[in-house]
Image (cartoon, helix red, strand yellow):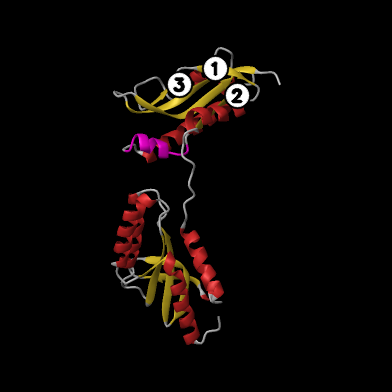
């Protein structure tokens, strides 16, 4: 295929305009011959928070999302087509979305090259200048991932089918438990993954469930809560995880805290209760 010229510009996050420290967060490309205008922006923020620990990641993510959507609209607008000419560059369109000023998001000087596939070149530029040195994404476990191995223990004991969804209500609150079994009173098991990326996230999740226990103090039905706990994969989060366990253990209604190493014990206890109740598994 015949190659065509293109221009590109990098979007940079400047944490402190006075210090001048910058990190690339996006790239925009324009190939006039094919009329291709596109942009890609950072989706992972771990590298930024390591360089600038006090950055407002949530706000930056929101800003970049708005810029990306603005580029998509600009590339589709009819009046934009009239501007697609050899006289325009990637910077021409970039400055329509973010002007030249002293804000924290600034465009680089113009780069250029030749391409036979502008979309592929955009991806290559994004990898080269934006995402190349990001740490590989680590898959975090959710609450459902904590339940799965416990369900295996239940299946071994042939009691996996005793559970049902149950909503516990009180004048102040109501909580839906996906895994509940009634034997005189309701036994409600809530898997909780603390495989999170920040200490604040771990504490907030623990506080949420302590709050639920406070809200259910005057529940209209008697129930026993169990928290099936998954630990963080990041060793640096373990102190926060231990604080969360201590917090949960002091919650109202005396929830039983079951860590992953204790799953088989809880499964045995439930199997004994099922047997004593005379219910067919």
In the rendered view, does 149 fall on the left or right side of 222?
right
Q: Earlier in the sequence, mark 1 or mark 3?
A: 3
Residue drawn where x is 32% and y is 59% of the image: 242
Q: CA distance from mark 2 to mark 1?
A: 14 Å
194, 164: nearer the viewer: 194
Q: Reply yes or no: does residue 8 show up in magenta.
A: no
Density class for disc 3 (Cα within 10 Å; few <14, some 14-19, many ≥20) is few
245, 61: nearer the viewer: 245
Residue annotated with mark 2 = 36
Q: CA distance from mark 1 to mark 3?
A: 17 Å
Residue annotated with mark 3 = 95
- Identify the magenta region: 43-53
**Residue 27: percent from left, percent from top:** 50, 27
Q: Reply yes or no: does residue 44 show up in magenta.
A: yes
CB under 8 Å between discs 1 and 3: no
On the image, which quarter does residue 157 sit in? bottom right
Q: Quadrant of the C terminus?
A: bottom right
**Residue 159: percent from left, percent from top:** 53, 76
Density class for disc 2 (Cα within 10 Å; few <14, some 14-19, many ≥20) is some
In the rendered view, does 271 fall on the left or right side of 51?
right
Q: CA distance from mark 3 to mark 2?
A: 17 Å
Q: Where residue 112 is drawn, which disc sits there?
A: 1
**Residue 121: percent from left, percent from top:** 59, 26
Q: Quadrant of the N terminus?
A: top right
């Amino acid at each position: 295929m015949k190659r065509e010229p293109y221009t590109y510009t990098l979007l940079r996050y400047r944490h402190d305009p006075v210090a001048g420290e910058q990190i690339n967060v996006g790239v925009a490309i324009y190939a006039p011959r094919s009329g291709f205008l596109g942009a890609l922006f950072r989706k992972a923020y771990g590298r930024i928070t390591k360089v600038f620990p006090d950055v407002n990641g949530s706000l930056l993510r929101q800003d970049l999302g708005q810029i990306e959507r603005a580029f998509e609209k600009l590339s589709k607008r009819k009046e934009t087509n009239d501007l697609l000419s050899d006289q325009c560059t990637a910077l021409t369109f970039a400055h329509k979305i973010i002007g030249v000023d002293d804000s924290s998001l600034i465009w680089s000087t113009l780069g250029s090259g030749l391409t036979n596939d502008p979309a592929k070149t955009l991806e290559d530029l994004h990898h080269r200048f934006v995402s190349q040195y990001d740490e590989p994404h680590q898959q975090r476990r959710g609450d459902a991932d904590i339940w799965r191995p416990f369900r295996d223990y239940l299946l071994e004991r042939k009691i996996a089918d005793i559970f049902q969804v149950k909503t516990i209500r009180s004048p102040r609150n109501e909580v839906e438990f996906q895994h509940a079994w009634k034997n005189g009173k309701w036994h409600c098991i809530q898997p909780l993954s603390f495989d999170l990326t920040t200490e604040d996230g771990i504490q907030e999740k623990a506080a949420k469930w302590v709050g639920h226990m406070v809200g259910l103090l005057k529940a209209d039905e008697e129930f026993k809560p169990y928290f099936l706990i998954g630990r963080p994969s990041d060793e640096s989060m373990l102190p926060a995880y231990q604080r969360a366990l201590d917090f949960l253990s002091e919650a109202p209604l005396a929830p039983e805290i079951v860590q992953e190493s204790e799953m088989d014990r809880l499964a045995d206890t439930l199997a004994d209760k099922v047997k004593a109740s005379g219910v067919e598994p």
